[in-house]
Amino acid sequence: MAHPKTARIVRGTARQLAALAAALRRGEIVGVPTETVYGLAANALDAVACRKIFRAKGRPTTDPLIVHLPSAHDLAGVAVPNAAAYRLAAAFWPGPLTIVLPKRAVVPDIVSAGLPSVAVRVPAHPLFRRLLRLAEVPLAAPSANPFGYVSPTAAEHVRAGLGQKVRVILDGGPCAVGLESTIVDLRDPAKPRLLRPGAVTRAQLERVLGVKVGAPPRRPSARTAQLAPGMLTRHYSPRTPVVLHARLTPTLVRRGATDEAWLFLMKPRGLAAKTVHGLAPRGDLRGAARRLFGVLRTLDTAGYKRIHAELVPGDGLAAAINDRLRRAAAR
Ligand code: TXA
Ligand code: MG
C-alpha cells in the first residue's frame, strides 16, 4: 500500500451501527462518542481486543481502562456493587460518573491493570448507548487520544491523533460535557474517595451518599499511585508549554510577546489581539468545560511559543477545569 489508510468517520446509520457492533464482537477497536470525551472502545471481556487499545494509544499497561455498560442493571456482571454504588447510579447514570468497585473475574486483568478493582460507567450519549446495546458486551474505553495528549471532544480530534491506528470512528458530534468523567472510589462505601474531578462534583456525591468524600490524591506517592493509577504522570498536555495564572489581566497581555497565546475564561472587551482567546463568552463554566480541550488543541497547532491560561475561580466544575489546566501545564 502506498499510503497508510486513515480512519473512516461514520454518522451511525442503523446499518453502520450493526456493523460496528459486529466489529467490536469480533475483537476490533472503534472510536466512539460519549458525552464526556471520545473513547477508544473494545470488548471489555476480550483481553486480546483490549490489548489493541493500549497498543493504539501507546498507553502503559499499568493504566487501567473504564468499562462502559448500557445500564446500571448490568453492574453486577462486571463488579461487586454495594448500596452506595446503586445510590450513585440512580442519581447520576447515565452520565459523567465512573465508580471504582471490586472486580469480577470475567473482567480480564489487562482491563484493570492487574488491580482487583474495576472502574465502571453508564454513559449518556444516545449513539454510544445504542452501540453498547447492539454490541451485547461491556465496552472498555479510555479517552481516544495518544497517551498523554489532550483528550478528544470531536470525531476529527480522534482522527488527527489515532487515524492510522483505528479503522472507524463513530461521529456523535461535539461532546456535551467536554471533560473526562468524575471518578469515585467506592470499594469501601464508608470511605468514598474522589480520584478525578469532573462534571459530577464532590458536593453532589456527598449529598447523595450522606458521607464526606475524600479529596483526590494531591502529590502522588507510591501509595496513591496504586490508589489512583493513571493519575501519576503528566496528562492532557499540549506540546506547547502552558503557563498558569491565578488571574490574567490586559496589562500582562500587553507586556507579553506576540508569539504567546492568552487564554481567558472570558475574553476581556477591548483586547482585540489575535493572540487573546476566551473559553466562554459569558464566563459560564459548562461552556468553558465543553470548549477547553478543543481550544487547547487549536492553540497547540497555531505555533505559539507559550500558552498563558487563567485558572477559573470557584469549586465544583471549576475544580475539574483547573485540574485539567494544571495537568496541561505539568512538565
Ligand atoms: O469520561 C471518561 O471517563 C472517558 C470516556 C471515554 O468514558 N474515559 C476516560 O478514560 O477518560 P481515561 O483515559 O481517563 O482512563 C481511565 C482512567 C485511568 O487512567 C485511571 O485513572 C482510572 O480511569 N481507573 C480505571 N480503572 C481504575 C481502577 N480500577 N482503580 C482506580 N482508577 C481506575
Ligand atoms: Mg485519558
Image (cartoon, grey):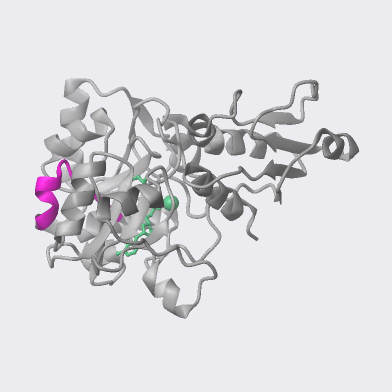
- Residue 16 or residue 210, whichever sits in front: 210
Residue lying at 20% horizontally and 47% vertically, measured from the top left: 89
Question: Residue 129's quadrant in the figure?
Answer: top left
- Residue 49 or residue 12, whichever sits in front: 12
15 w.r.t. 205: above or below: above
Residue 294 location, x and y as percent?
54, 34
Residue 197 location, x and y as percent?
44, 52
Residue 240 location, x and y as percent?
69, 47
Residue lying at 52% horizontally and 34% vertically, measured from the top left: 285
Residue 258 location, x and y as percent?
85, 34
Residue lying at 39% horizontally and 74% vertically, measured from the top left: 226
Q: Is residue 69 magenta?
A: yes
What's drawn in magenta, residue-wise? 66-76
The answer to whether 72 appears left or right of 118 in the picture is left
30 w.r.t. 281: above or below: below
The answer to whether 81 appears left or right of 267 in the picture is left
Q: Is residue 200 magenta?
A: no
Taking the view exactly as shown, the residue that stands out farthest to the bottom is 222
| Residue 2 in view, yes or no | no
The N terminus sits in image quarter: top left
| Residue 128 in view, yes or no | yes
Question: Residue 190's quadrant in the figure?
Answer: bottom left
